[in-house]
Amino acid sequence: MEPRNATEAEQAREPAFLERVYLQYKRLMFSIAGKYAASLDDQADIVGEALVRMTEQEERLRAVDKRALTAYIAAMVRNTAINFLRHRGVIRQYEQVSWEEMQDTEPSPALSPEETVLRADQQDWVRQVWQRLSPSDRLLLEGKYILELTDRELAATLGCGTASIRMKLTRARRRALKEMQRKGGYDAQ
């Protein structure tokens, strides 16, 4: 059966190309996603989102050679995984615990009420300092110390050379320290 118009022809060939890409690069995509997410469900979400993004670039991808396609797929999955982790961090920040869950958990016997209040104050203080940092400093520090990205991965995320990451991290840490000292409550010894 022949397609009736040009859009039907495009839709008919789209799944074949993406299916071929998926089958050929499945192991690579899941390997890269596995570096960022331990859960198979999360890895599948990352790979699926990367494939959806690839549909937007299908014409361009059809024209590139195998080496460029492999590099593009690797970068797409890596960037999708990083975005996935960032998004998950934002969601966790705003998640709320239900009343039933709160009743099921018992308070930690290790912390006294005073220690609990002090810890909450410290967390609030760190949050205020964090918000005063520039987005690039937060991205650098979060990538290095929270997401535990390598210097190479940070460089790719920021679009700079690997050699400059160490200096950028040093400067970001210094600015964070200055903000902590400016905000008060922190003595560098």
Image (cartoon, grey):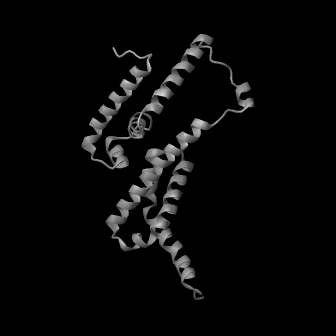
| For residue 47, above or below residue 170 | below
Q: Nearer the viewer, residue 96 or 107?
A: 96
Residue 8, image x and y in percent? Answer: 57, 81
Q: Is residue 94 left or right of residue 19?
A: right
- Is residue 112 in view from this perspective? no
Residue drawn at 69 percent across, 24 percent down? 105
- Is residue 24 in view from this perspective? yes
Residue drawn at 41 percent across, 37 percent down? 134
Q: Nearer the viewer, residue 131 or 72?
A: 131
Q: Nearer the viewer, residue 144 or 140?
A: 140
Q: Is residue 178 left or right of residue 120?
A: left
| For residue 70, above or below residue 7 | above
Q: Is residue 97 left or right of residue 22?
A: right
Q: What is the total number of numbered labels drawn onto the structure image?
A: 0
Q: Residue furthest left?
A: 163
Q: Nearer the viewer, residue 16 or 138?
A: 138
Residue drawn at 70 percent across, 27 percent down? 102
